[in-house]
Amino acid sequence: MTTRVEQLPAFLTPARHFSWRGLILSFVLTLLAVIVFAGAFVFGYAAVHAGKALPGVHVGGISLAGLDRASAEAALRERLPQLHSGHLTVQFADVQQRITYASIDRDYDMAAMLDQAFAVGHAGSLLDQVQDQVAVLLNGIDITPQMRWNETALEERLGAIAASAYREPQDAVIQRSGAGWTVIPAADGQTVDLHAGLSQAVVAVDSLSAADSVIRVPATVLSPAVSTAQAQAAVDRAESIVAADLAVVGGGTREAISADMLRGWVRLDEAGVGEWSVVLERDPVAQWVASVAAATNQEPVDASFKFKGDEVTAVPGKNGQQVDVEATTDAVYASLLSRAEGGPPAPTVNMAITVVEPEFTTEEAEAAAPRVEMISSWSTNYTIYEGNNFGGNITAPAKHLDGTVIEPGGTFDFWGLMPSSLAELEGVGPGGIIRGGRTLLTGAIGGGVCSVSTTVFNAAARAGLELGDRRNHSYYIERYPVGLDATVWRTKSAQQNLTFVNDTQYPVILRTINQRGKVTFEIWSLPNGRTVEFSKPRVENQERAKDYIEYTDELAAGQTKRLEYPRNGFESWVTRTVRDASGKVIHRDTFYSKYRTISGILLVGRGPTDPVAGTRVQR
């Protein structure tokens, strides 16, 4: 037998001694073998499940093992609750609306869930993948479902609902209503806490439940800046002023400011938020007081004189009264405003009245009466005939003026002292007037009264008084002084008057003396030292009148009747100079008169041989 002995390789030759190097080498080789095996396992396992979920992978308890991504999503869609199918009921204050889950895109975050599921055992390092695969094989993994929604859409929908629940608070308003005021009441507003609603909505939506949800946010009351009570208080203050009449008394007068009138004087002005000031207009108050004052004021009456037979006696004066408009207005104004301040309404207000004494007192008149004397007089002679109603148109107006007193500063007004019609005076009738340069013997009621006015004028002129209206007659009348006649007349639309002013410090009395064919006016007063001078009349531009015979058949043959006397025309100037006791000139008046030329006419009854009727022949 042949035995073959072969020498073993060196590395298989038993060591004679323990070797660490061999041990390390063995470990490394073993490790490499494990790694190679693991790698081969991972590679093989991954290759088997490429693009698929590993066994043991679940999402919300639903197994995705062996499913590709599309199949996995389909499986999840089918088996998970439908998060977009329900709705959220929102109750904001008194407004309720629904927000569907679909409108806010509420759904699963499918991409995130699948990414997480398919990353198990397929992502990370080789070691990570091995660990995941082993863990999933041993224990499995269940991925919690994830969801998402459109937060911006949710906020917008909630904001819109909150806006619809918002109520603007309404301030109380005062409106003028006719003569009063009406309060339009205030109203509370409301709002909701949108942040609180959003927080509740997020909690309700952020749930894997498909069930409907409800959130509630109560209203927050918004109070108005101006309350009904504030407005009503202002109206009450104004109404307290105008609620009752206010009587104003004094000086024998009692007048009331009516409540209706007061309402027109009071207004409410806004002074700030929820504040009104009651405004009482002062001007209307002052105007009203002024009107009452005008009726209440009384001028003092100066003491005067009168004739008692031939003796002059004193006529007592009388105090006047004057309302102080400013002080009375202040009192009325203050009384009305006190009503608005809650004070008791005063029933009356007393006018502030001042007593006004006469300038010429009773005592002064009584002391002066014995010294009163005639300071001037003038007389006019006249013919008693039908042209002056046989003297009645002179004596009656003259008598009417008898005893007339003109106080210091007062005015003698001829027509103002006469009745509205001279016919009211007993004894007055038709008389002559000058019209169109011709005399009409019975052309007007009271014709001839110019003898009265001319006589008064001359008496006043010679008393040195201040003269006013005066006008000469159309033609010169011989019984009057040249340039110093004074005609008066009156129609419905115009008048010629005679006036003068008592510019002395004492009353003057007009005294009438009627005699047959003569009228006299005397002016009596205390001596004032005045002297009066008249210039000699300056006469110019004289024109001699012609006298004609006019034949007529209205008279018997040879019978005559004077129709018009011839009147020469001219212009005249007369100057009056009045001096006071010291010799100082106080009046210098020049009286101008222009007298027309009037042709005389003598009617003659026509005889057989005379010219035809109407023929005029100069005499």
Image (cartoon, grey):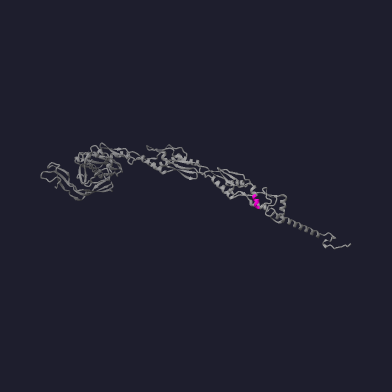
Percent of width and height locating residue 270:
47, 45
Q: How many marks?
A: 0
In percent of width and height, residue 218 lies at 57, 43
Q: Point out the image quarter for the N terminus.
A: bottom right
> Is residue 553 visible in this depiction of the protein?
yes
Q: Does the segment drawn in magenta span residue 414?
A: no
Q: Position of residue 377 (x, y in %)?
A: 24, 42
Q: Residue at x 45, y 39 (%)?
A: 239
Q: Position of residue 575 (x, y in %)?
A: 24, 49
Identify the image quadrant of residue 350. Answer: top left
Residue 310 lies in quadrant: top left
Q: Is residue 324 visible?
A: no
In the figure, is residue 81 to the left or right of 414?
A: right
Q: Nearer the viewer, residue 563 or 460?
A: 563
Q: Give the camera-side residue of 502 and 277.
A: 277
Query: Quick one: 533 or 286, which is closer to the camera?
Result: 286
Question: Which residue is at the far front?
Answer: 1
The prevailing secondary structure element of the residues shown in magenta is helix
- Residue at position x 10%, y 44% from top? 608
Query: Which segment did they paint magenta?
Result: 69-74
Q: Is residue 413 left or right of residue 16?
A: left
